[in-house]
Amino acid sequence: MTSTIFARRWNITDKNIINIYNSLQDIAWHFGSHGINGECCGDLSFIDFIALKKIYENSEITIQGLGSAMNFTKSGATRIVNRLEGKDYVERENSPLDGRVCCVRLTEKGSVTISKIIENYSLYLEDVLKGFEPKEVEQIEIALEKLFAAVRRNKPFNSNTVSIIEGECL
C-alpha cells in the first residue's frame, strides 16, 4: 500500500519499480563474486569482497566500524573478519589510542587481491561503457549516487516501508 501511494505521488508505476529492482539485481550479478568469465575473487564470497573493499578504502577501520559500514552487527562483522583473517587477507591490531578497540588492516595478500579485483572490474566497466556518450556516463553516475544515498537513508523493510514478509512459515 505504501509503495502504491509513493508511486502515485511521484508518478512512478509499479512496473518502473519492478524494472529498476530487476536491473539492480542483474547488474549486481555481473559484478558479483563469480566474477568476469567465472574468474574474480577466488575464495571470497561477495560479502567477504565487500568487507575487504571497505577495509581497503579505510585503513583505520575498526571491527565495529566495518559492521556499521556494511549494516551488520559487531558480531556479524567479527565473523567476516575471522573468515578473512583465516584466509590471510586481514590482520587484527589493537588501537594504539585505545587498547580495547580492535582495528582491521589488510595483509600484503589482501592488498594485492583487492587491488587486482578493483582493477579488473574497472577495466570491465570501462569496456561496458565504451558505447555511451560522456554525458550519458555522467548521468548514470549521478543517478546511481542519488539512488545509493536514498538507499542509505532508508533501511530495508523498516517501519517506513511496506513489510513484504507477512504471515507464517509453512
Image: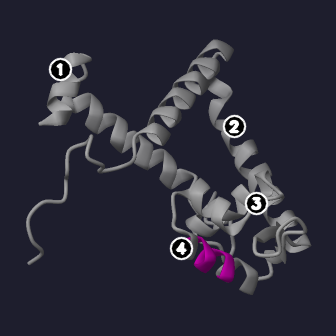
The residue indicated by pointer 4 is: 76
Q: CA distance from mark 4 to mark 3?
A: 15 Å
**Residue 138 falls within the magenta-colored stretch:** no
Is mark 1 in CB contact (under 8 Å) with mark 2?
no
* Magenta extent: 76-82
Q: Which one is earlier in the sequence, the residue at label 1 or at label 2?
A: 1
The part of the image, by quadrant, that contains residue 134 is top right
Residue at image coords 36%, 35%:
20
Q: Quadrant of the N terminus?
A: top left
Report the mark closest to the observer, 1 or 2: 1
The residue indicated by pointer 1 is: 8
Q: Residue furthest top?
A: 135
Q: CA distance from mark 1 to mark 4?
A: 38 Å
Report the mark closest to the observer, 2 or 3: 3
Q: Circle 3 sits in a helix, a strand or a loop, which is it?
A: loop
Q: CA distance from mark 2 to mark 4?
A: 36 Å
Q: Does 24 sit left or right of 91 as displayed?
A: left
Q: Which one is earlier in the sequence, the residue at label 2 or at label 4?
A: 4
The residue indicated by pointer 3 is: 61
Q: Which one is earlier in the sequence, the residue at label 1 or at label 4?
A: 1
Amino acid, disc 1: Arg
The part of the image, by quadrant, that contains residue 2 is top left
Residue 163: x and y in percent read: 19, 51
Q: Which one is earlier in the sequence, the residue at label 1 or at label 3?
A: 1
Amino acid, disc 3: Ile
The residue indicated by pointer 2 is: 127
Is mark 4 in CB contact (under 8 Å) with mark 3?
no
Amino acid, disc 4: Gly
Is mark 1 in CB contact (under 8 Å) with mark 3?
no
